[in-house]
Amino acid sequence: MEMLRDLLLVKPLIPDEISEGGLFIPESARTRNCMAGVVSSGKNSKAQPGDTIIHIKEAGQEIIIGGEPHYIIRDCDILAYLTNGN
């Protein structure tokens, strides 16, 4: 899928089932993760496919691709780029 202008197609990283304290978190109680991998980007976007980003919570429009949620967000919704898994 080719994105236009400054739009990005991102796939959210799956939130952990186990909290840092060791408690199981049921799927119904998990919140949408603000960390995502860039799948496709428009020509005016600074992000590139393969980048991992942190975006504004609840940004974008959800679409389902292959049974998995993806989001279309704007480049300006990116808060940070993650490098080397940090």
Image: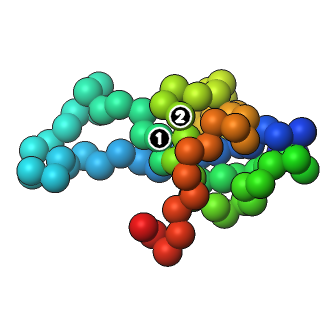
As drawn, is 19 to the left or to the right of 32? left
Q: Is residue 2 left or right of residue 84?
A: right
Write the residue at 14% across / 42% down. Answer: 24
Residue identified by numbered label 1: 34
Q: Position of residue 38 (x, y in %)?
A: 66, 53
Q: What residue is disc 2 on?
A: 56
Residue 72 in the image: state x and y as whole percent.
70, 34
Neighbourhood count class around disc 1 (C-alpha, 10 Å): few under 14, some 14–19, many 20 upward: some
Examine the image and state in which quarter residue 26 appears: top left
Disc 2 + disc 1, Cβ < 8 Å: yes
Which residue: 49% across, 74% down?
84
Of mark 2 and mark 1, the one earlier in the sequence is 1
Left or right side of 11 for 76: right
- Left of 53 or right of it: where is 20? left
> Residue at 62% of width from left, 43% of height from top?
78
Q: Could you say whether the residue bearing mark 1 is in a helix, strand or loop?
A: loop
Residue type marked 2 = Ile
Distance in Å between CA atoms under marks 2 and 1: 7 Å
What residue type is disc 1 on?
A: Cys
Q: Which image quarter is the C terminus in? A: bottom left
Query: Could you tell me residue 56's position as x and y percent?
Result: 53, 34
The answer, for residue 64, to whether it is visible in the render is no
Q: Which quadrant is the N terminus positioned in?
A: top right
Residue 50 visible, this angle? yes
What is the number of the mark on residue 26?
none
- Give the residue at x 89% y 39%: 5
Element assignment for label 2: loop
